[in-house]
Amino acid sequence: MTKPLQLLFSDPPLFWNKARNRFSSAHTRLQEERDQLLIGLAYANLCKAIYKTPKLKTAYAGKDILGEEALADFGFTVEDSLKGYFEGRADDLIRPYQEISSFDPNQFDVILIGEKNRKIKQKILDGLEGCDCLIFDLERAAALFSETLRSIKSKHFLSCLNSHKLAAIALALWLCPAEPVIIEAGAFQCGTTLFMAKFLHKMGKQPRIYALDTFQGIPKAKDEDKKYGFVFDEGIFTQAQLSKISKRLKKERVHEWITLVPGLIEETLPRILEKEKEISLLFLDTDQYAGTKSTLDLILPLSQQKPLTVIVDDTTLPGVNQAIVEALAKTPAFQRHSVFMNFDILIQATRQERFLFAMTRNGGSGR
């Protein structure tokens, strides 16, 4: 009667290691699926907003797409399963195997690639050469997202953004050129700054990121901020200390790509724009009218003819929303799209489809 108990407790490493391994593999798979869904939802919302459609006729290529039922909920629809799956498993009866050579881009809006094997992924990409359909490497983008988050120590990751918003940021970074210039207006403790630097580095890019903030707390709110609801006013966000932020960035080994710029944005941003003539990404998170308005008024007119992505957080705040409306009235070349609640993207109207096509191909095809 005592043998089973002796086996359980006399040799705990063997028992618990097996249990841990089983749990770990399941947990890892669920994390992988979660990150594909986060990136997939952000991409779906962006596509649907730009194309003004609730559904995207979708094809899948590769055997490593996870959570297809949830992706369908996001608007990725396979209208005919006999035609919607390519280069999967030959023995999969639910998703019939087809060669990528039989893919017809005229039947689909987008093809999502989910393949870890380099040779098979390259075969898929070669088969899609010249295709005018949207092509998005969901597996690669999600893997980079996962790798980035795993590489950051929890105590250093002091970001105000939730996982959905971080996924949208990752998509914008996916689009950036090899040496992007990024401005973050309203950086607080620089957790998002850290994420952006790490993600770009894992893509093999060499960014210059300017993190703008007073680093002493939020300025006094204007009348435009006080129309209704909660007001972000002076005395909030005073926890940011430059010395501690600098130490965290050094410990994470990203400090060489990040310049911390203390002061009021309307005073510090013009000096940056004297030096940097082409901005790849502007992330605006000032929570107030004045900071949002001054940043957009300075950057949008300079970038009407150049590729620029603008992401704005807390867009339902009255001051932030008014600042966006006023800035777009002056620069109608940009259009506004909601990616997630309270989180908008501004893109040049003439670049919207090119923006999506660039995103599908710019991130790299393999590891």
Image (cartoon, helix red, strand yellow):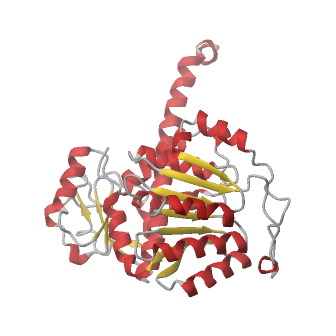
> Is residue 170 toward the left or the right of residue 186 in the image?
left
Residue 296 location (% of width, % of height): 59, 73
126 relative to 284, above or below: above
User: Is 276 in front, or is 165?
Assistant: 276
112 relative to 348, above or below: above
Q: Residue at x 53, y 52 (%)?
A: 209
Residue 187 location (% of width, % of height): 66, 55
Choose top left, top right, bottom left or bottom right for residue 251: top right
Q: Residue at x 58, y 48 (%)?
A: 259
The quarter of the image holding the N terminus is top right
> Is residue 293 toward the left or the right of residue 133 in the image?
right
User: Is 203 in front, or is 69?
Assistant: 203
Q: How many marks?
A: 0
Q: Residue furthest right?
A: 235
The quarter of the image holding the C terminus is top left
> Is residue 77 toward the left or the right of residue 39 in the image?
left
- Residue 164 in sight from this viewpoint: no
Q: Residue furthest left?
A: 101
Q: Residue at x 30, y 50 (%)?
A: 115
Choose top left, top right, bottom left or bottom right for residue 155: top right
Residue 267 location (% of width, % of height): 68, 64
User: Is 103 in front, or is 147?
Assistant: 147
User: Is 90 in front, or is 359?
Assistant: 359
Q: Residue at x 45, y 80 (%)?
A: 54
Residue 201 location (% of width, % of height): 44, 44
- Residue 44 in sight from this viewpoint: yes
